[in-house]
Image: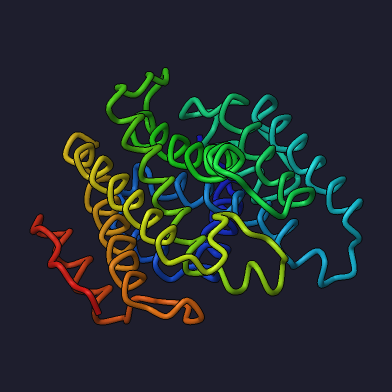
Amino acid sequence: MTTLYDRCAQDAAASVIAAYSTSFALACRLLGPRVRSHVRSVYALVRVADEIVDGAAENAGVPAATQRLLLDDFETETLAAIDRGFSTDLVVHAFALAARECGIDGELVRPFFASMRTDLTRTQHDGASHDAYVYGSAEVVGLMCLQVFVNAGRRTPLAPAPHLIEGARRLGAAFQDVNFLRDRADDESRLGRDYLGLHGDRGDRAAVLARIDADLAAAARAIPDLPADCRRAVATAHGLFAELARRLRVADDSVRVSVPAPVKASIAARAVIGLPQRQRVA
C-alpha cells in the first residue's frame, strides 16, 4: 500500500527531475503511470549523487575529502533503505520503493557510486577508464530503468531479456557520450576533467560520434520489444539524443548544443504516433 510518506517522497523526486532536465521531464510524461514515478525516482537519486561531485557541494564550501564522505554515506543509506524499505531522505526513500518492487539491487547501485567516486579522484581518462566510468555512471542507470519497465507492478521481479539488457546499456552509453561532447568545454574549464581524451582532435571526435551512432542504432532495435507503456518515452529520449548527436557533428566545440523546443515537440509527437524520426542536421 502506498502511504502519504511514499507519495511525498515520489513527489520530491519528480520535482528534482523537473528542475534539472526539461528533456527528461518531457520523456517521463510519456511514460505510463505504472512506471513513471519509479523512473523519476531513479533519476532523482542519480541527480543528487551527481551534485555531490559536480559542483553543488564544492560551491557550498565542502572540501573534496568531505565530498567523498558524503557520497559514501549516500551510498550506504541507499543500500540500507533498499533493505529496510524506509529512509528519512525523501529521494532515497523514493528510490528504495522502486528498487524493492523492481529488483534493483547492489549489483547495479554499487557500480554507479563507484563511477561517481571516480570524479573525485581522476580527471584524465583513457579508453579503459572511460568505458568503466560509462558503465557505472550511465549503463547501469539504463539497466535500473529497464528493471522498472519490466517489473513495475509485479509481485516477483523477472530478469529482462538479454537483447533488452544490451539495448539499455547501449542507450545509456550513447546518452553519456553525447553529454561528454556537449559539456566538454565546461568539464575541462570548470572541473578540469577530460572524459574523452580528444584534445581538440576532430578525427577523434568523429570516432566518438560514430560510436554514439552505433550505440543509438543498437538501442533502437530493442525499443519495439519494450512494454507498450514505455516505448513512446524511450523513443522520445532516443530521438532527442540522436538529434543532439546530429547537431554536434556540425557545431563548434565551444558551443553547447541544445534541441529547440519546437524540435523537441516534433520528436515527441512522432514517437507518440510511432513514426520514424526525421533526419536533421541543424
> Is 18 or 183 nearer to us in this picture?
183
Q: Is residue 124 left or right of residue 158?
A: right
- The quarter of the picture where residue 218 lies is top left
- Relative image position of residue 173 (x, y in whole percent): 43, 45
- Relative image position of residue 216 (x, y in whole percent): 29, 49
> Is 36 or 104 nearer to us in this picture?
104
* Residue in the image at 28% along x and 57% along y: 30
- Relative image position of residue 164 (x, y in whole percent): 30, 30
Q: Is residue 250 left or right of residue 133?
A: left
User: Quadrant location of the C terminus?
Assistant: bottom left
> Is 181 or 111 nearer to us in this picture?
181
Residue 281 higher or lower than 231, as above or below: below
Q: Is residue 164 left or right of residue 23?
A: left
Can residue 95 be seen at all in this image of the molecule?
Answer: no
* Residue in the image at 10% along x and 59% along y: 273
Can residue 104 be seen at all in this image of the molecule?
Answer: yes
- Relative image position of residue 274 (x, y in whole percent): 10, 55
* Residue in the image at 49% along x and 29% along y: 101
Task: Give the tally of numbered discs.
Answer: 0
Residue 61 higher or lower than 110, as above or below: below
* Residue in the image at 80% along x and 64% along y: 57
Colouring: rainbow
